[in-house]
Amino acid sequence: MKTTTYKNWWFLALNGLIATLLGVLLAFFPTEVIQTVVRFFGIALLLAGLIQLIAGIINIKKDKAAGMMVSESILFLAMGLALILFPDNTLKIFSILFGIWAVIIGIIQLVIIVNIKGNLSNKNLLLFNSLLTIILGVILFFEPFAWAAFLVVIIGIFIILFGLLLIYFSFVLRSLKSAEEPAEKT
């Protein structure tokens, strides 16, 4: 009995259609997608905080150290609630903090590059990376949603292309099946 890989070509076409629709959502509705992802992340943090708080209470009842676990759970609960209730403001605060961090990391990279003794073949690449990190930090500091929305649109475009290629590939497999069917009947 001969099995063929193209027997279920329609499954690839369906996955391609789903990927294309997801890409359209990401490319044309980036702000809504970001807000939804932030809310889901807030729910995940809230659940993680609750689980960690329960584990901390159980450890306290067993006379085990649980101070750090309870402190982390309170932090997770607060961050989760903030992301769920105020996704725009919380994302803006996280983006600003990430922007500050990126600028600091970029400056540290520049200092390291300047202090490298000897001939380094990838010095220009490291310089480019440090400058790019600083630029990313500045963009995130002043325009956090613009950068995030831009990345979501780019990802959406790539997913649309992937989905369309998957649909094309599924029809190529379908044509292979129909071309081989007469040979199998003999």
Image (cartoon, helix red, strand yellow):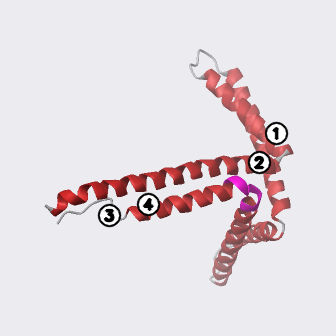
> Could you tell me residue 156's position as x and y percent?
64, 52
Q: Residues within 10 Å of mark 3 (few under 14, many from 20)?
A: few
Q: Quadrant of residue 60?
A: bottom right
Q: Are marks 2 and 1 in contact (CB under 8 Å)?
A: no
Residue that carries the numbered disc 4 in the rendered image: 12
Q: Which region shows up in magenta? A: 27-33
Number of marks:
4
10 Å crowding of disc 2: few (<14), some (14-19), many (20+): some
Q: Nearer the viewer, residue 161 or 90?
A: 161
* Pointer 1 or 3: first along the chain: 3
Measured along the vertical axis of the image, is residue 2 above or below residue 161? below
| Measured Cα–Cα span from mark 4 to mark 1 | 42 Å
Q: Secondary structure at mark 4?
A: helix
Amino acid type at image mark 3: Lys
The dot on residue 7 is: 3
- The Cα–Cα distance between marks 3 and 4, rounded to whole angstroms, is 10 Å
Q: In 3D space, how far apart are the residues under numbered discs 1 and 3 (Cα atoms)?
A: 52 Å
